[in-house]
Image: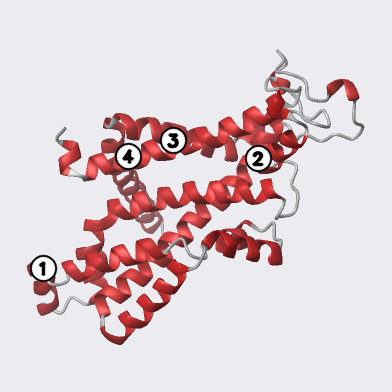
Amino acid sequence: MAIVVSKQSTINKKRKIRVISTLLHYIKPLWKNRKARVGLLITIFYILLATVGPLIVPKPVIVNVNPNMIFLPPMLNPYYILGTGPIGCSILGDIVWGSTFILEVSFLAGLFNTLIGIAVGMIAGYKGGILDNVLMSINDIMMTMPSLILILILATMIKTTNPFILAGILSISGWTGLARAIRSQVLLMKSLPYVEVAKVLDLGSFHIVFREIMPTIASYIAIHFILNVESALYASVGLYFLGVLPVNQYNWGVMISEALNSAAIYGTSAFWYLLWPSVFVVLFMVGLIFLSYGIDEISNPRLRSR
């Protein structure tokens, strides 16, 4: 019994070492690239803000509104270091507690878009024939539809606060560009010699797609995922800013909307309530853009040689 337990613990340790070495294998080139390093650090900061932040920063709960605490500028008090909002709540608390939902929706939408795009593009390109024609017809129809209007209609009808459902709404047509690009790559690559050899050896479609074709376009898929996260962040903040979705005090879009309604753009005391959520949105965008540029430079020999 002791020998079995010892073997199992050894296997678990080897698995952990293998996972860590795989992560280091992908992170090391990112860290060597300056743009990717900056983008990775900013992205990690936001992930920590959304996961660890709510454990450190108290949730802003106001029972009795104090008129003397409304729209105050940044103070030395750590909790009010960014100032206060329209009911005297901490801007820092609103941003930290709002980051979790924003990042959940953004990354889920990016994941949904990427997975759908990969599935449609791979199946259409590899199988071909009638299936290819049907999938690409659906893809072209979705691509020509006005995605913004479609998202607004669905968000107005459903009015959800569930991050999975909202991410699904934001993913309604964002996968079409990736699907068509992957299909083109697969059509090109499935006639290459090493893919033909894999077919002759009868290695199976799963092996050919995920072991022979997928690794060559992995960097493009990663960049597309990052760009999808970026567009989903803009869209989710925009929907809350427009008031299409149910009001959430801790959402960055709601904060920007309330600040503008309080004439923050004219330099009133609500200026800080407009500034900080806008800064956090833009900074996250900058981090994602730098990360995508870095991945592009690493994977593109022409850019890497400069």
- Depth check, mark 2 against mark 1: the one in front is 2
Question: Which residue position is annotated with label 4?
Answer: 293
Question: Where residue 252 is drawn, which disc sits there?
Answer: 2
Colour scheme of the rendered structure: secondary structure
At a point 61% along the width and 40% down the height, the residue shown is 99
What's the amino acid at mark 1?
A: Leu
Quadrant placement of the N terminus: bottom left
Q: Residue 91, position in %: x, y?
A: 71, 29
The vertical placement of 162 against 65, above or below, is below
Q: Which mark is residue 287?
A: 3
Please name the residue shown 28% across and 55% down the image.
218
Q: Is residue 118 left or right of residue 163?
A: left
State which tag comes first along the sequence, 3 or 4: 3
Give the Cα distance between marks 3 and 1: 37 Å
Q: Earlier in the sequence, mark 2 or mark 4?
A: 2
At numbered mark 3, what does the secondary structure look like: helix, strand or loop?
A: helix
Percent across and percent down for residue 62 are 85, 34
The three-letter amino acid code for the residue at tag 2 is Trp
How far apart marks 4 and 1 lie (CA) works out to: 29 Å
Real-space Cα distance between discs 2 and 4? 26 Å
Question: Residue 53, located in which quarter of the rendered image?
Answer: top right
Residue in view at x 25 percent, y 57 percent: 217
Residue, disc 1: 192
